Image: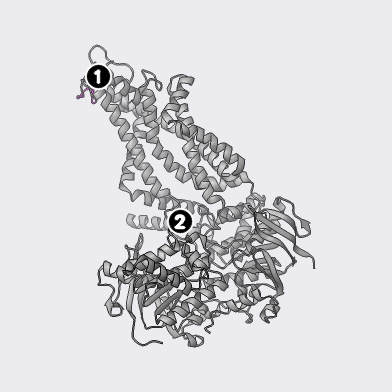
Amino acid sequence: MSAEIIQSRREWLLSDRPASRLQARLGRAYVTWRRFSANRLALIGLLIIIALLVVAALADVLAPYSPTIGDLKNARLLPPGAAHWFGTDDLGRDIYSRIVYGSRWTLYVVILVAVIAAPIGLLVGTVAGYAGGWTDAILMRITDIFLAFPKLVLALAFVAALGPGIENAVLAIAITSWPPYARIARAETLTVRNSDYIKAVQLMGASPFRIVLRHIMPLCVSSLIVRVTLDMAGIILTAAGLGFLGLGAQPPLPEWGAMIASGRRFILDQWWVAAAPGAAILIVSLGFNLLGDGLRDALDPRSGDQ
Amino acid sequence: MTAAIAIQGLEVVFDRFRALKGVSLEVGEGQSYGLVGESGSGKSTLLKAITGLAPVASGTVTVNGKTLGKTRDKAFYRDVQMVFQDPYGSLHPRQTVDRLLQEPLAIHGIADGEKRIERALDEVGLGKGFRFRYAHQLSGGQRQRVAIARALILEPSILLLDEPTSALDASVQAEVLNLLEEVRRRRKLTFLMVSHDLAIITHMCERLMVMQNGEAVETLTASQLIGHRVSEDYTRNLLRASEGFVRV
Amino acid sequence: MSGDTLLEVDDLRVTFPTRTGLVQAVRGVSFSLGRERLGIVGESGSGKSQTGRAIMGLTPPQAQVSARKLAFDDIDLLSISPRQRRSLRGNRIAMILQDPKYSLDPVMTIGRQIVETLRTHEKVSKAEARERALAMLQAVQIRDPARVFDLYPHEVSGGMGQRAMIAMMLITGPELMIADEPTSALDVTVQLDVLKILDKLVAERGMGLIFISHDLRLVSSFCDRVVVMYAGKVVEQIKASELRDAQHPYTRGLLNCMPRIGFERHPLPVLDRKPEWAA
C-alpha cells in the first residue's frame, strides 16, 4: 500500500506535464535531490553538516560541563577518559564541551561570511558583466586589487585596523572573500548576456535592473552556492588562523582555532588539547567540501539541461 | 496603405565592420516581407537594428509612422516583437513556460495575465498541460511555439522573424509555418521575415528583398520570383541552388 | 553503378544506457552498399547519424552495438581488434562531419593536418606528402592551394573548411566515404559547390558513399538510392529516381511538407505521425 503511495508521489514529482507552479518547482527540486543523493560522498558531507547544525542547536544539552569555567584545582590537562571524553585543557575546562559550544562559533563565522560576501560578489559580478564598458573596468579593477593580496594577510591587516574580536574577524574574512565570487558571477554573466533568451527579455522592454536581478542572477546562483560551500572550509581555516594568531575570537570564547593556539604549548605532552579541535576543524571542513562537490554535480547548469 | 516599417539608408557598423551598407525598404501594414540572403548578408542585422540590438550608424527607421531614435521605449516593444532562430537558446533554462509568458505582462503592467497566458497557449496549439513545463521538457517545435506565444502575448502589430524554422525538422517546420500564417491572418500582423531559404520566403511573403554583403541586391514580389523574372545573377544563383543538386 | 558489395549491414542495433533504462537509437537497420551513392534520410532522433557512426566505429563507449552482420569488404567490423579498426578508419573508410570547425584541429595548419593524415597511413617522404596534399587541395577546387596549405582552420570560410576536410579525408584514397550532413552548415550556393566536388571525386575514384542528411530533396537529387529512417528503423528503401512513387506515408509526408517555389499550398500539409510507423 505505502509502496504504491510512494510510487505515485514520485510519478507526480517527475511528471512531464506539471499542473501547477508548485508541482513544477517541487519536481525540479526532486530531480536535483536525486542527482545529489546518487553521490554517496556528498551525502556523507551533508550528514556532517547536519550533525554540526544539531550539535550547535543542542549544545546546552550535549555539553556536560561549562565551556568557559574549568576546575583548575582537580582537572588540569587530564587525558581523555570517561569523565572528560576529549580530556581537559590547561585551565581545567572540558574540551568536549568546548568543542560542542565552539560549533556555534564556527557556524556563526561561516554563515555570516557567506551572507555578507556572496551577495556582494554576486551583485558586483553580474552588474560588471552585464553593463560592460567603464562600469565593468572599474568594478573589476577593484576586485583585482582585493585579489592581489593573500587572503589571510589582507584579513590580518583588516583585523589589525578594526581591532581583534570574532565580529571583526568575520568582517575581515567577508571583505577578503567576495572577489572570487564576483569573478565567477561575472564569467557566468558574460556567457549568458548575449544569449537569445536575454535578448528576448530586452525586447520586451525590461530594464537592465530587472534583467540582472530576475534573469541573470538566478543563473549565477547555483555556481556561486557551489563555490561558497567549497570555500566554507577555507573560511573556517582562516577564522581558525586568525584565532590562532590571537586576532579572532578572544579567550575564553571556545573557538576552535583559538583552542588549537592555546594547546600548542603542550602539544608534545598533552597532545589532545590541540588535537581535538583540530580534528573538529578537519571533519567540518571535509563535510563542507564533500557537500560542495555534490552540489556542483547536482546544480551545474551545464550537466544536463535541468 | 501606410507603411508599418520604413527604413531609409540604414547603416550598421560593428567595430569598423560595415554589416549594413545603406539599405532601404518599406513594409506596408499587414504585409509580409521577406529578407533572403546567405550568411553575412546582413539580413539578421537588419532585424536587430530595428529592435535596437544592433548599433545604427546612420539612416532612419520608422515604425507605424514614428521615427525611432537611439533608444526604444516600452511602447515600441508592445508594437514590435521578435521570434529568434534557435528555439534551444531563446527560452530561459530555469523558467517555466508560465514564468516566461508572465514576464512581458509584468514588465508592461498588464493585469489580466491568467487569461492572456491561457489564450496565448491555446493560440499556438499548446494546451494547459504545457504551462508549467521547463524548456528542457519541450521538443524543438514546442519551444518555438512557446517563443511565438511569448511574442504574441503583448499583442504587437509587427512580428520580426529571424529564421524561425531553420533549426527544426521539415515536418515540424511545416507546422510552425502554418501556425505563423494563421496568427498573421487572425491578428492582421505585419511580418518581416528573414530566411536563407527562398522556398520558405516565397511561401510566407508577398514581397522580398535579396541581400548580399550588407547590401540589397534586388527587390521582388513573390510572383516575380516564382516566374523566375529576376534581373540579378546572384538571385538566379540562389534560385538554382534552391532546386537541389543537378548532375551535369 | 553497383556491382560488388562494399558494405553489408544486417540488423544493426545501437543501444544507449540512460538514467531511465536502455534507449535504442538504432533498431535493426539493414542495407547493403556497392560502389554507389546511398542516402540515409531522417529527422532528428531517427538514428541516421548513429547508424553512420556505428559503421565508422565511432559510437560512444557506453553504447552497445550489435548486428547480425556488419561487414566491410567481407571484413567483420564487430570482431576485429580496435587497432585493425583504426587502421581501416581513415585509410579505407573515411567520414566527413557537419561542421569543419569542430572536426579540424584548430592549432594545426590545414596542410599539416592533411600531411599527417597521409603519413599515418602510408610511408611517404615529407616532400612527397606535401606534393600530394597540394594536389588534393587542388582537386577540391581550392584556387590557391599553396596559400591555404599554410592557413589555420579558423582563417578560412565554412565552405573552404569543408573542402579542406574532404581533401583530408580523401587523401588516403578510401573506398567508402560516410558524409554526415556535410553541407548543412554551409550557404546554399556553397553547398552545391561542395556537393559537386564530392560527386566528381566519388565518381572518378569509384568509391561508395553514404550521405546522411535530414534534407530528403537534396539527398534524392544527389544519391542513387535512398534509405528513409524513422525512430531507429528503416521505413523505406527506394531508388532516388522513383522517390515520387514512394509508398510509405512518412516518406511521402516528408516530401510534401516542404514549401516549394511555384507550388503554392496554404496551409502546408503536415505529417500525421502514426504510432505503427515506429513499431
**Identity, as a three-letter code, of the amino acid under mark 1:** Phe
The image quadrant that residue C105 belongs to is: bottom left
In front: label 2 or label 1 = 1
**Identity, as a three-letter code, of the amino acid under mark 2:** Asp
The x, y position of residue C95, in whole percent, is 40, 71
Going by the picture, which residue comes out furthest to the top?
A: A73
Q: Residue at x 47, y 85 (%)?
A: C240
The x, y position of residue B120, in whole percent, is 61, 62
Q: Residue at x 38, y 34 (%)?
A: A234
Q: Is residue C185 visible?
A: no
B242 inside magenta stretch: no
The x, y position of residue A199, in whole percent, is 60, 54
Pick the residue in front: A267 or A60. Answer: A267
Region in magenta = A80-89
Say if A145 sits above or below A253 in the image. Answer: below
The x, y position of residue A53, in whole percent, is 37, 34
Describe the element under mark 1 as helix, strand or loop. Answer: helix
Say if B155 sits above or below A54 in the image. Answer: below
Q: Quadrant of the N terminus of chain B?
A: bottom right
Per the model, the C-alpha gap separating discs 2 and 1 is 55 Å
Pick the residue in front: C147 or A159. Answer: C147
> Image check: A41 left or right of A177?
left
> Image check: C234 left or right of B173?
left
Picture disc at residue A305: 2
Say if B133 sits above or below C44 in the image. Answer: above
- Please give the residue where the numbered disc 1 appears in the rendered image: A266
Q: Earlier in the sequence, mark 2 or mark 1?
A: 1
Crowding at mark 2 (Cα within 10 Å: few <14, some 14-19, many 20+): few
